[in-house]
Amino acid sequence: MALLRFYLPQRYHRPVIRTLRRFRTTWAKNSGDWKWLEGRPVSLANLNRSLWRGSNPSLNYYTLLFLSGVISALGLLAGSAATIIGAMIVAPLMGPITGIAFAVSMNNRRLLKRSGMSLLTGAVLTVLTAYLICETLGLTTLNPEITARTRPTLIDLAIALAAGSAGAFAKTRRDVADALPGVAIAVALVPPLSVVGIGIAMSSRSVTVGSTLLFLTNLAGIILSGGLVFVWQQYGSLNRARRGLIASSLLLTILGIPLGLSLRKLVVEEQSRTQISHLVRDYMLTFQGTDIQSLSVESDPDRLIVDLAIAAPRDTFSESQIRQARQFLAAELDRPVELNVRVFPVREFSVPAE
């Protein structure tokens, strides 16, 4: 107000001041939840009690987790994204993991043991449930919903860090508790465990290892970011949380190596796929005029593996043409290329209406 009196002519002082006061009063009456500066965290006793209950390895906990595991396994085997999302919401695993993050910030060994035991037994139950369901149904096909959880990257780590921060912050505020289901969906704890069980049932080492890596990435990311948020909200201190945060950071550093390599491989494959698709459709006379059904690229350390599926009549291509196409791709990409072409015979029938 003093600045206004200094810069404005005197005849404008009162109208401007009245307008500003009216605006401030209107804003205060209608701002509602936007008064974030007035939001106060829950008390330490209430938060500790809530997380202690959420980490309780009770019959209710295992019942919900078992049902969530059933929904998740069936959704994965059926390739149903909506069903998998339902399993994420039902799963109670976020409780003990958030309890571990809080125990780290407070150096609370009792809560750490309780939450750790609930998490470990719950993870084993989920894996076992998926294994038994897969063995019973006898399905051996890996659909996109399963394979999507076998190649984690640094992107998944970033999601876990953000979700862990959101989950911990939601626990400290009564008015944002509704965000917890969204956090459970974002970080997806149960589906990776279900994929572990499916991988064991199918005797697929790559599926088992990849999904285990994804779960460990989510777990370590939530614990680290959640612990930091609890410390930031003045639950515990950096001195108390030092050991736990160092352990989580060390685990994330170790996990970051394969995650970074996986992300690099994913980027290379996507860039190569875009370039190869452009070359095949626009510059290679061999494939012009054909119906390209699918194009996939896999990057190995010493080569690119290109799988091309084409719908065309029989004897459209010869082996020499495919060899020339491979040489052209290798020259353009400046990298060894293995080209696999599958041709689906096309037979068309046209029956006129009677």
Image: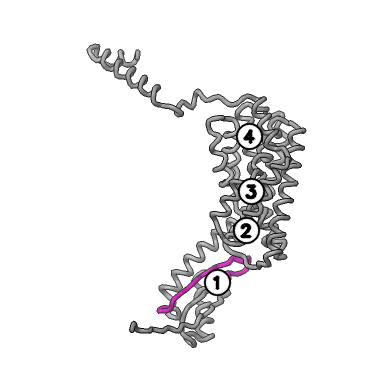
Q: How is the image coloured?
A: one colour
Quick check: 104 above or below 284? above
Within-10-Å neighbours for mark 4: few <14, some 14–19, many 20+: many
**Secondary structure of residue under mark 1:** strand
Q: Main SS type for the magenta part?
A: strand
- Viewer-nearest residue: 116 or 68: 68
Residue interval drawn in magenta = 288-306
Quick check: 77 above or below 226? below
Residue placed under numbered mark 2 in the picture: 74
- Viewer-nearest residue: 34 or 8: 34
Q: CA distance from mark 1 to mark 2?
A: 32 Å
Residue placed under numbered mark 3 in the picture: 189
User: Viewed as shown, does residue 288 lie left or right of 53?
Assistant: left
Indicate which label's residue lies in the foreground, 4 or 2: 2
Within-10-Å neighbours for mark 3: few <14, some 14–19, many 20+: many
Q: What residue is at 66 percent from the left and 68 percent from the top?
A: 140
Rendered image: mark on residue 306: 1
